[in-house]
Image: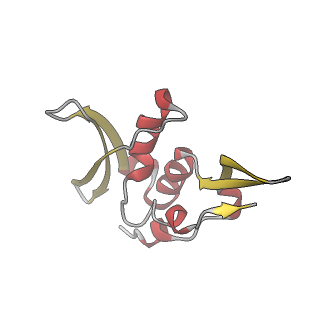
Amino acid sequence: METAGLSKKLEVSNIDFKVKQLIKSGPKVMALLLAYKDARVDMNILDEVVGPENWQNDYKRDSKGVLQCGIAIKFGSEWVWKWSNGTESMTEKKRANILMLLKELVLCGVLIDIYTIFQIYL
């Protein structure tokens, strides 16, 4: 199976920004913007590159109760799994843990691109 497409650069339309912090300096206000992408972006890339029938994800808790997310790609008849645990977000606690699990998995370069963007101040 050809997986090179998993490391292709993201299209600008797949990147969103949100304000993390407003900083007031005298009469001026600066905004710290964070780049992010929706987990659906990665799902669409996986569907396009390996086919929807050749990848899957699963969630389980480890022995300490920490939620883990795994993504597998099927190579021939074998499923190759990568697992990660998410980082809790203080801004969106309810959804963030599960979404971050999927987004943080670095599987064949799928999720690397978004993390190469620097913080942006406006």
Residue at coordinates 70% horizontally, 61% vertically from top-left? 121
Q: Residue 51: image x %, image y %?
A: 45, 53
Judge by depth and name the residue closer to the eye, 25 or 1: 25
Side of 35 relative to 6 (left or right): right
Which image quadrant is residue 12 in?
bottom right
Where's residue 49, x and y in %?
A: 48, 61
At x 17%, y 32%, the residue is: 64
- Which picture quadrant has residue 86? top left
Position of 33 with respect to 99 (left or right) is right
Quadrant for residue 28, please give it. bottom right
Residue appearing at x 40%, y 52% in the figure: 104
Quadrant of image for the N terminus: bottom left
Q: Residue furthest front?
A: 26
Left or right of 69? Residue 92 is: right
Give the position of the C terminus as an image quadrant: bottom right
Q: Is residue 67 above or below residue 108?
A: above
Q: Residue furthest right?
A: 27
Of 74 and 39, which appears nearest the observer? 39
* Whole-percent x, y for residue 34 in the image: 62, 54
- Position of 62 with respect to 107 (left or right) is left
Count of numbered marks: 0
- Above or below 81: residue 8: below
Q: Position of residue 94 (x, y in %)?
A: 48, 26
Front-most of residues 54 and 58: 58
Tell me what residue is drawn at x 53 percent, y 71 percent.
8
Residue positioned most to the top: 94
Please say which color scheme the image uses.
secondary structure
